[in-house]
Image: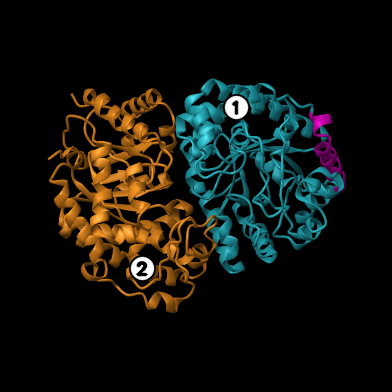
Chain colours: A cyan, B orange
C-alpha cells in the first residue's frame, strides 16, 4: 500500500510529501457529475455502492494519496432526530426545524451508528474493499460546534445570530447540546474506524466565527472530548479548525496527530509554533487552482519551501476544492507535489 | 470638545475609554430608517444635508464619542469612472461592468475629490459644523485592495474567483489597478481632512481572503502608500484589516496610529504584540449586542480587563453593528464602556 499519508500523519520519514484534497470527491469532476445527474445528493450519500464509487474517483482520476469517504456532515444530526432536507439548487442541505429551545435539545437521541447510520458504515466497508489497499481511507465528521451551528441556524448563515445568542445568552443549553454532539460524533467516528477507515478528520468549519475564549469553551473543548473517545483506536486524528489560527497551540494540544491549516497562515510559521508536537496538513489557497499549471507548480514549491525539509507535512488545499476548478488543474496540483517534494525528504 | 477619542488614538492619557461603533449611522436606528424610507441609499450618500443628519444621529441617540461620516466606500470607484448601481433589496451596491481586462484598468481616471466627490466634502463640512465640536469627526475609505475586490468581482463574493485570478495569474495588472487606487484613496482622504474630518480610517474588509504573503504584496503595501500620502496632515490614521491577524506586526508598522481589531483576537495578546507602537480599536463580537444589557456589560468588562490599565484603547465592535440590533442594546454597550472604564485609567 501507498502509506505515505499515514506515515506523514505520524511524522515518520517519507520519500515524498503525500497529497490529497478536501472535497476531492465532488462536482469539479465530470465523472462525479455524471453520477449526480442520475441521483439526488442525499440518495448518493445513502447508497453505499454510489458513495464508494465517487469516493474512489479521485484516486483513479487525480492520483491523490488518500481516499476520503463521500458523505455529508449533517447525517449525524439527522440520525439524532432532526429532519434534514436537500432541495436541488437551493444552497445545500438544511434543517427546516432548527433548534431554538432546550426541549428540542433534550429530545435529541444518541444514535447507534451501526443501525442509524448503517449506510455510512456499509459505504466505508465497500470503499475500503474496492480500494484494494491502494491508498488509506479517511473518515470524517463535523466538530460538535460546527454541527451545532447548522442545527441552530438551520443552514449556513452570515451573522450566525441564533447560535451566538445560544452561547452568549443561554450557555448551559449550548453545553448540553455540545455534550450530546461530542458523544454522538465520538461513536460515529469509532464505528467508521471499526468499518475500515484508517484515519479520521474532524472539520471545524465554523470555529472561526467565535472570539478566542468562546472558541476554546464551545468548540475546542468538545473536539478534545471527541479526540479522547477516538484516541484508543490508535488511528491518526486530524483536526482542522478553519480561521482559528489564534488558538493554534491549543489545537495542537488537543490530542490530534495532525492539525489542518487554512491558507491564511504561513505553514513555516505554523511549523515553528507547533511542528514539534503535530504534523501539518495544508495549505494552498483553493482559488490558486484557477491559475495555470505552471503557476500552480510555483505555488506548490513555495509552500514546500515554507514547510522546509523533513517529515510531518501532508499537502492539501486550505479548504475544499471549488466546484468549477478544471480537473486538469487538480491533476497538475497533485503531480507538482509528487514531482517537487522528493528533494525535501532526501 | 470631548476629545477622548483623539487622545486615545495618540495613546495619550484619558479619563475613560472612548467608544464608537462601526456602521453606527445605520439601519438598527429607527431614526435612520425613517430617513431611508424617503430616499434611496445612493441619494442619501449624495445629499449632504441628509448624510450629515444620519451621521450625527448616533451621537445624539446612542452617546458615542466620535462621529463617522455616512457614506459608502464604492463612491471612489464610481468617481474613477465605474458605473455603480444600488437596487433596493438586492444585496447592496454593485458594479454592472466589473473589471476583467487591462484596458478597463487603464481608462480609470484619478478623480479630483473636490469636484468628482464634492458631495462627500460638503457632507463633511456640514457635519463638522453641525457637530459643534461635541465629538471628533472620522472620515473613511476602503483600502485599495478592498475596493479592487469589489471592482473586479462586481459585488461581494464567496470565493473571490475573479480577483484571485487577477493577482495569481495577472499580477502586473493587479498592481496597476492598486497603484491607481492608492493615489485616488490618498487624494480622497486628504480632501476629507481639508473639509474637516479629524481622523481617518482605512477599511480593509477583504484583506483576510488572502494568504499572508499575498496580503503583504497586494493589500498592505497599498495601505502603506495611502498612509504615506495622508501622514503629512498629522491627523490620526486608523487601519482596520479584518481577518488579518497573521500580519498584525506588519500592520502596526504601516505608519498607522491605531490598528483596528476584529473579534477573533484577544485584545490583551494584540496589545502585548503591538501596543507599544500603536493604539488599538475594538473588539467586541457584534453578535454580542443581541444579548441582554447585563450580558453586554460583562463582555465589555472582559475586554477592558484583557486590554488592561492605561491609555491607547478605543472601544468598538469587531465589525459593523448588525442591522437588527435593538437600539437599547447599542446604548447599553456605550453606557457600559463609559461606566466601567474609568477605573482602568486611574
Residue B295 lies left or right of residue A167; in this view the side is left
* Label 1 element class: helix
In this view, the residue farthest toward the front is B38
Magenta stretch, overall SS: helix
Q: Nearer the viewer, residue B61 or B296?
A: B61
Q: Quadrant of residue B327?
A: top left
Kindly identify the residue that appears in the image at 48 percent across and 30 percent down.
A214
As displayed, is residue B168 above or below residue B337? below
As displayed, is residue A145 above or below residue B157? above
The residue labelled by disc 2 is B78
Kindly identify the residue that appears in the image at 37 percent across and 57 percent down.
B41
Residue B173 lies left or right of residue A314; in this view the side is left
Camera-side mark, 2 or 1: 2
Chain of the residue where label 1 is placed in the rendered structure? A
* Label 2 element class: helix
The stretch in magenta equals: A113-130
The residue labelled by disc 1 is A222
Horizontal and vertical percent for residue A338? 67, 57
Q: Nearer the viewer, residue B228 or B302?
A: B302
Residue A238 lies left or right of residue B75; in this view the side is right
Quadrant of the snapshot with the N terminus of chain B = top left
Residue A111 visible in the shown view: yes
- How busy is the neighbourhood of tag 1: few (under 14 within 10 Å), some, or many (20 plus)? many
As displayed, is residue B332 above or below residue A153? above
Residues at marks 2 and 1, CA–CA distance in whole angstroms: 48 Å
Quadrant of the snapshot with the C terminus of chain B = top left
Horizontal and vertical percent for residue B130? 16, 49
Q: Is residue B116 magenta?
A: no
Amino acid at each position: 500500500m501507498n502509506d505515505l499519508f499515514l506515515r506523514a500523519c505520524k511524522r515518520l520519514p517519507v520519500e515524498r510529501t503525500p497529497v490529497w484534497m478536501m472535497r476531492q470527491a465532488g462536482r469539479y469532476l465530470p465523472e462525479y457529475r455524471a453520477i449526480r445527474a442520475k441521483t439526488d445528493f442525499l440518495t448518493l450519500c445513502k447508497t453505499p455502492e454510489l458513495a464508494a464509487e465517487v469516493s474512489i474517483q479521485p484516486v483513479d482520476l487525480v492520483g491523490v494519496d488518500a481516499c476520503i469517504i463521500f458523505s455529508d456532515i449533517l447525517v449525524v444530526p439527522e440520525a439524532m432526530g432532526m429532519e434534514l432536507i436537500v432541495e436541488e439548487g437551493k444552497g445545500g442541505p438544511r434543517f427546516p426545524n432548527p433548534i431554538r429551545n432546550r426541549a428540542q435539545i433534550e429530545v435529541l437521541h444518541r444514535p447507534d451508528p451501526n443501525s442509524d447510520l448503517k449506510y455510512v458504515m456499509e459505504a466505508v466497508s465497500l470503499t475500503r474493499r474496492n480500494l484494494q489497499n491502494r491508498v488509506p481511507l479517511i473518515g470524517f465528521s463535523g466538530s460538535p460546534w460546527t454541527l451545532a451551528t447548522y442545527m441552530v441556524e438551520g443552514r449556513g448563515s452570515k451573522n450566525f445570530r441564533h447560535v451566538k445568542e445560544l452561547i452568549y445568552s443561554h450557555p448551559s443549553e449550548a453545553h448540553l447540546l455540545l455534550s450530546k454532539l461530542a458523544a454522538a460524533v465520538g461513536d460515529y467516528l469509532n464505528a467508521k474506524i471499526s468499518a475500515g477507515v484508517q484515519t479520521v478528520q474532524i472539520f471545524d468549519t465554523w470555529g472561526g466565527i467565535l472570539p478566542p475564549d468562546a472558541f476554546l469553551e464551545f468548540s475546542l473543548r468538545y473536539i478534545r472530548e471527541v479526540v479522547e473517545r477516538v484516541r484508543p483506536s490508535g488511528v491518526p486524528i486530524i483536526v482542522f479548525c478553519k480561521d482559528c489560527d489564534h488558538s493554534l497551540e491549543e489545537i495542537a494540544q488537543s490530542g490530534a496527530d495532525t492539525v489542518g491549516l487554512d491558507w491564511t497562515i504561513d505553514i513555516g510559521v505554523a511549523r515553528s509554533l507547533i511542528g514539534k508536537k503535530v504534523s501539518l496538513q495544508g495549505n494552498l489557497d483553493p482559488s490558486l487552482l484557477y491559475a495555470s499549471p505552471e503557476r500552480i507548480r510555483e505555488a506548490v514549491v513555495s509552500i514546500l519551501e515554507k514547510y522546509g525539509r523533513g517529515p510531518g507535512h501532508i499537502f492539501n488545499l486550505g479548504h475544499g476544492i471549488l466546484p468549477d476548478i478544471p480537473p486538469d488543474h487538480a491533476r497538475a496540483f497533485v503531480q507538482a507535489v509528487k514531482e517537487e517534494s522528493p528533494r525535501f525528504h532526501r
